[in-house]
Amino acid sequence: MKAVYQEVRGKEGLRIGAFDDPRPVTGDAVMKVKAGGVNRIDLYMRDVGKGITHELPLVLGVDGAGEIVEAPEGSGLKAGDEVVLYPMAYCGRCAACNRGDHPNCIKFDIAGETRHGTFAEYIAMPAKCFVPKPDTISWQAAATLPVAYLTAWRMMFGKDALKPAETALIVGVGGGVSSACLQMAKMIGARAIVTSSSAGKLKAAQALGADHGINYRDEKVARRVMELTGGAGVDMVIDNVGEASWGDSLRSLRAGGRVVTCGATTGGHPSADIQRLFARQIAVYGSTLGSIAEFRQLIDVVARGNIAPIIDNTYPMDDIAEAFERMEQGEQTGKLVVEIDC
């Protein structure tokens, strides 16, 4: 099959060409990939990969949607089924899985990280990881859901869900997760304040319903947030930026507020500011992906038209390096999608 794979670390090690077909094991189904979404983790696996158990060469890609071509008996799947991939192969037996908390499974594999991914003509994953794709969702839109939109869903509606009467601060709007969080906040009627250094991204966010935009190069974020909230602060901060924004994120919260993080693109070691945490009784939550039940909820919401995934650009497989470059430069608004067989 044709695939995008990492042979050695770095841009020079990215390959597009022939790769072995997947070898399904007991319980696996095989999907013919139609489209896959590009994520920050793809750049990390290309350049670093530290802390993630894997071997090179590795087929990249975590997001994906496609058509079943092979399925085990009794799986409920059959050839021709249109599906979206839940990218985490969870054990189904540990305490976390038994309570439906699949992202905290003690024994898992993730496509494009610890096993071969979706930037290929075919992928094999456990049959339980394939969720039906409604006809109302395009291949390109479906390919945006497993990582960015599912991560956003769990951040917004997971441990301490954002409520319609609350205000959220979304840091670094423009990327896939932050754009999805904005859509979800407005879907439930919450107020949303967003930040960016790009006037274009702030304008795009306001078109999506953002109530206020703050250019952090021109304004002090926490000070402006306090002005906009009458000195109270926001109820929730969504921050996947890390060190560069963490101080402002904490200072922007109301007493008893919460900050939810799913990434640290500018570094993972900011000041903890412990005094502020306990004095204002601030909660900090980490979040990644979501459960299979949350994934089904998300797909249903998208199928009903309550959320329309934002796609910045699409690329053929042969041009994936261009997609990586656009993400690396932070130029996108929304998701970048690779079309495999659309």
Image: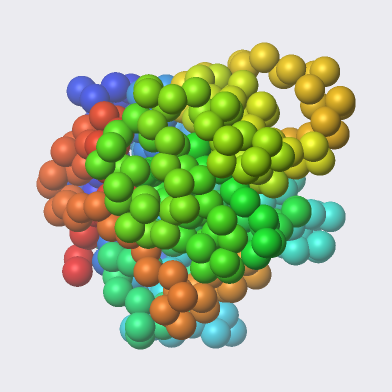
Quarter where residue 162 is shown: bottom right
Residue 257 lies, in percent from the top left, at: 75, 41
The percent position of residue 103, horizontal first and vertical second, equals 66, 51
x 46%, y 82%: residue: 304
The image quadrant of residue 144 is: bottom left
Q: Is residue 88 above or below residue 48?
A: below
Q: Nearer the viewer, residue 20 or 92?
A: 92
Q: Closest to the observer: 251 or 23?
A: 251
Q: Which quarter shows the C terminus?
A: bottom left
Residue 88 visible in image: no
Instruction: Pick the residue in front: 337 or 104.
Output: 337
> From the viewer's perspective, is residue 139 above or below residue 256?
below
**How many numbered badges does the structure rendering display?**
0
Considering depth in this image, is 161 or 163 the residue closer to the camera? 163
Point 42% across, 79% down: residue: 305
Image quadrant in which you'd find residue 9: top left
Q: Residue at x 66, y 27 (%)?
A: 251
Protein image colouring: rainbow
The residue lying at 37 percent from left, 69 percent from top is 308
Relative image position of residue 290 (x, y in whole percent)? 62, 56
Quadrant of the rendering where the N terminus is positioned:
bottom left
- Image side of residue 270 versus residue 183, left or right: right
Residue 81 percent coordinates (x, y): 39, 82
Above or below: residue 226 compared with residue 317: above
Residue 245 visible to the viewer:
yes
